[in-house]
Image (cartoon, helix red, strand yellow):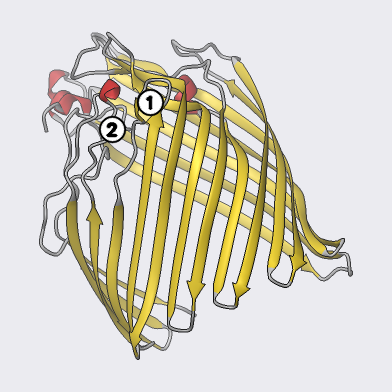
């Protein structure tokens, strides 16, 4: 590893989850369903560099540690109503998400703590409705509307924000889609939508302490004045399906106002976030063919191209054209599958962020299994030929990234057994 003092290892990850859903159906001719949901998630993650070369520079057990916690709780109340020949789904939801990360570094006399993400809470209240109306036996129109009220507040201080700093975001989203089935085996659709995304805690308030920023130790920080991204998008697609064959194809174009873009601050050793005007377009294709009996051939492909219109250059952090081709034999008792994973070279990179070209690659996976009664046994190997390859920008989002590309896993064997009551 080129810069080991920038790296830490996980000590533990502890996750607790609760989810409760209650549903009442067919209450009346108008009220078709009522649904209530409540949930709570809690994740605690501790990492340090006690196993790294950087810990040798101090007599203490470690020279750097980050203790991160995140908690989400919320609920949703929804109803499905039969109105005016169509179906209305409407309701209200709420969630609170808290993110707190404390970075501890060894000083001359003692450890020093810094609020890397200053105990930030996000409260979101949303109200929504979606109406689906058959216009003819082959034509369906659906539309939706949602309003979100979001409050973000810090409970601690760091160099970017004081305790009690707050932001408020209000946003309206909407969509309209027309679906046409000219034959039983063909479905065509087109639609348009407007959506919003508020900046998250990291993008607003992240502060990674670096004593002396340099090319090998980037100062990574948020931008507390970011605006919410507004996306205007158009979609078109088709699905062709029979008993032995299907193809799904969809394409989209997005115009993104105030897109939150990761950037290298010009003339500095700093990385941060900035609102830019951007566009994206792309396509997805998936298909399955029953060759004969229990043998299936499957394939999928996805492609996205992004443009930073404000900077007149490719948008950063865009994956390359990628896909999978697989053949699977499955008779309901045992199965065997071979898959080829492929990715094209990504040469559309953001020079402002110092992105570099990533070569294309291909790997082979094999897996098989058997089911008997409630038991199932699955075994497989990923990257059968032990290829060395790199996923485009897989290392870039880590604030403690090393500055070099890190290869993905080599050959990996796995075995799992399960029982269903």
**Residue appearing at x 41%, y 24% in the figure:** 102
In the image, taking residue 246 as reference, residue 341 lies left or right, namely left
Tell me the SS state at disc 2. loop
In the rendered image, the residue lying farthest to the front is: 182
Quadrant assignment for the N terminus: top left
Q: Is residue 283 above or below residue 84?
A: above
Q: How many marks?
A: 2
Cβ–Cβ under 8 Å for marks 1 and 2 = yes
Q: Earlier in the sequence, mark 1 or mark 2?
A: 1
In the image, taking residue 258 as reference, residue 85 lies left or right, namely right
Instruction: For residue 370, say whether it is visible.
Output: no
**Residue appearing at x 38%, y 44% in the figure:** 304
Q: Residues within 10 Å of mark 2 (few under 14, many from 20)?
A: some
Q: Position of residue 391 (x, y in %)?
A: 24, 45
Which residue is tagged 1?
Answer: 262
Where, by quadrant of the figure, is residue 365 drawn?
Answer: bottom left
Of the numbered discs in the image, which one, if any, rests on residue 135?
Answer: none
Which residue is tagged 2?
Answer: 396
The answer to which of 412 and 343 lies nearer the viewer is: 343
Determine the CA span between mark 1 and mark 2.
10 Å
Q: Is residue 58 above or below residue 23?
A: above
């Amino acid at each position: 590893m080129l810069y080991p003092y920038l790296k830490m290892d996980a000590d533990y990850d502890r996750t607790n989850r609760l989810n409760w859903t209650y549903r009442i159906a067919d209450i009346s001719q108008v009220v078709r369903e009522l649904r209530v949901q409540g949930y709570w998630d809690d994740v605690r993650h501790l990492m340090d560099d006690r196993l790294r070369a950087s810990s040798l520079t101090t007599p203490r057990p470690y020279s750097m540690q980050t203790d991160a916690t995140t908690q989400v709780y919320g609920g949703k109340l929804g109803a499905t109503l039969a109105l005016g020949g169509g179906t209305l789904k409407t309701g209200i939801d709420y969630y609170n998400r808290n993110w707190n990360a404390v970075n501890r570094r060894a000083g001359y006399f003692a450890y020093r703590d810094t609020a890397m993400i200053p105990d930030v809470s996000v409260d979101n209240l949303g109200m929504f409705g979606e109406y689906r109306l058959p216009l003819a036996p082959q034509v369906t129109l659906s539309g939706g509307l949602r309003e979100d009220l979001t409050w973000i507040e810090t409970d601690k201080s760091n160099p970017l924000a004081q305790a009690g700093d707050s932001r408020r975001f209000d946003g309206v989203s909407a969509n309209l889609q027309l679906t046409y089935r000219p034959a039983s085996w063909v479905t065509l659709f087109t639609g348009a939508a407007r959506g919003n995304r508020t900046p998250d805690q990291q993008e607003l308030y992240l502060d990674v302490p670096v004593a002396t920023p340099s090319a090998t130790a980037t100062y990574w920080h948020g931008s507390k004045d970011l605006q919410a991204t507004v996306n205007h998008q158009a979609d078109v697609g088709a699905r062709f399906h029979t008993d032995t064959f299907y193809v799904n194809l969809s394409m989209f174009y997005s115009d993104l106002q105030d897109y939150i873009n990761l950037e290298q601050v010009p003339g500095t050793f700093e990385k941060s976030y900035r609102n830019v005007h951007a566009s994206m377009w792309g396509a997805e294709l998936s298909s399955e063919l029953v060759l004969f009996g229990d043998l299936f051939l499957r394939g999928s492909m996805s492609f996205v191209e992004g443009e930073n219109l404000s900077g007149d250059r490719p948008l950063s952090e865009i994956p390359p054209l990628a896909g999978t081709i697989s053949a699977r034999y499955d008779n309901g008792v045992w199965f065997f599958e071979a898959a080829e994973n492929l990715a094209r070279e990504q040469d559309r990179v953001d020079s402002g962020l110092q992105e570099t070209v990533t070569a294309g690659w291909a790997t082979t996976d094999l897996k098989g299994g058997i089911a008997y009664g409630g038991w199932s046994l699955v075994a497989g190997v990923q990257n059968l030929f032990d290829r060395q390859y790199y996923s485009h920008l897989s290392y870039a989002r880590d604030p403690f990234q090393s500055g070099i590309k890190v290869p993905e896993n080599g050959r990996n064997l796995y075995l799992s057994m399960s029982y269903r009551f």
